[in-house]
Amino acid sequence: MSWMENVSLVTLLFNFAFFYPVVMAFFWMVGGIYYYLRRERGAPRPDAPPPLRSQPPVSVLVPCFNEARHIADTIHAIAAQVYPRLEIIAINDGSSDDSATVLESLLPQYPNLRVVHLEQNQGKANALRIGALAARSEYLVCVDADVLLDPHATRWMVGHLIDGPRVGAVTGNPRVRNRTTLLARMQVGEFSAIIGLIKRAQRVYGRLFTLSGAICAFRRTALHRVGFWNDRMVTEDIDISWRLQLDGWDIRYEPNALCWVLMPETLRGLWQQRLRWARGGVEVLLQHGRKVLSWRRRRMWGVLLEYALSLAWAYTMLVIVVLWLLGKVVPLPRALYVDTLLPRWHGVVLALVCLLQFGTSLLIERRYERGLARQFYWVIWYPLAFWSIGMAAAVVALPRTLLSWRQQRRARWISPDRGVS
């Protein structure tokens, strides 16, 4: 009798559901540590960037929709950049609040600010494209309208574009600035322990899955070659990342390019955000997945496999939950019976691995942000809360995207959850 005959389907499902996050956590930790030792240890601190070979003009694009409460602070932080030749282009994408009035009131205060008003809401991708066409510079820095840029962020990102002729884009290091609820505090750990390590690991083994839409810089020539942003994709940042890399451009991660962002602090807002991210990932898989399989694009295989396994994990968890529910109402064969969803010793191991991952990130990220250790306790709840939401979002996003794929429409904005005021 083969070993497969002695292993039940439920055992196989539980093994994959357990070992996938554990293996990936160690993979990201090893990649993050290697990246740190090679590129960050001993490097200049965020507030002391090295001198640039030249200081070409830079255009900062700020697309906004219904951001009257935050846009003035964002423009103020951009104007405070330690960079001499800077123009700011704010694109008001048909806002229904007082965003237009606020932007117009800022013009006398900031001579390098230009405001473009669009009559109707046509989506962030279209707003970015309009801003790029209006810009006078080859180098474009794009930030969300709730972002507070670190004074040296532009200098750090533009340095990569100046020094690397094949660098098409650079993504920065967003940090969570609203921390009044448990959800927000867990996201502090997520952005450092999860997202930061993932980007470092991906840079080590190949390509990045996505730029951060909150803070990134582009070479306009590269954008022109790939046709700028696609306004039919739910997440324009994931799509432009893949198209640039498929066209042969390099995308870099610059952890010294800091910015402070507002994140959802309600379950509804968090669900809408994660569902949009999940749908964007599925759209990119459908649009570009087959192109990645060629040998010439083999460096993209890592991110493709990583995302495919994450989808498989989400549906594995769904099958486990469904089998558990069925077992409560109908008799099931022993090979399909799930007696409990309680984590038992698996949950203890996952929690310890999560803490180890966050502890690793603390050693790396302490040069960028003080006080991260205070969030150490909250991150232990991350697997329970965010994995559940992420799993559900992936499960819902796949069929929804498949059903609507042929009827793609322009992706318009909705007012996001900016946290509890």
Image (cartoon, rainbow, N blue to C red):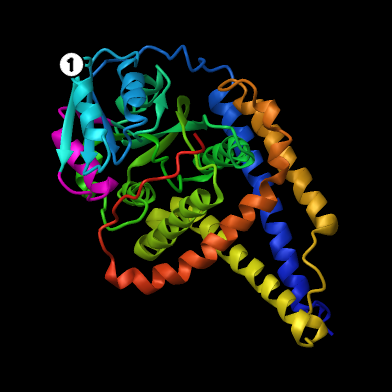
Give left or right: position of 152 versus 34: left
Location of residue 287 in the rendering, given as x and y in whole percent from the top left corner:
34, 63
Front one among 233 and 270? 270
SS of the residue at dot 1?
loop
| Quarter of the image with the N terminus in it | bottom right
Location of residue 282 in the rendering, given as x and y in whole percent from the top left corner:
43, 62
Residue 362 in the magenta stretch? The answer is no
Using a 10 Å C-alpha cutoff, classify the residue at mark 1 as few (fewer than 14 neighbours), some (14 to 19) or many (20 or more).
few
Residue 134 in the magenta stretch? The answer is yes
Q: What type is the residue that disc 1 sits on?
A: Pro
Q: How many marks?
A: 1
- For image coordinates 46% across by 72% down, the residue present is 399
The reply to whether residue 194 is visible in this rendering is: yes
Relative to 234, does residue 59 appear above or below in the rendering? above
Q: Quadrant of residue 97?
A: top left
Q: Which residue is mark 1?
A: 108
- For image coordinates 53% across by 44% down, the residue present is 205
Location of residue 414 in the rendering, given as x and y in whole percent from the top left corner:
34, 50
Relative to 332, does residue 165 appear above or below in the rendering? above
Relative to 12, does residue 88 appear above or below in the rendering? above
The reply to whether residue 294 is visible in this rendering is: no
Front one among 6 and 92? 92
Q: What range is drawn magenta here?
A: 119-140
- For image coordinates 71% across by 52% down, the residue present is 22
- For image coordinates 69% across by 71% down, the residue present is 321
Give left or right: position of 145 versus 181: left
Location of residue 2 in the rendering, given as x and y in whole percent from the top left corner:
81, 81
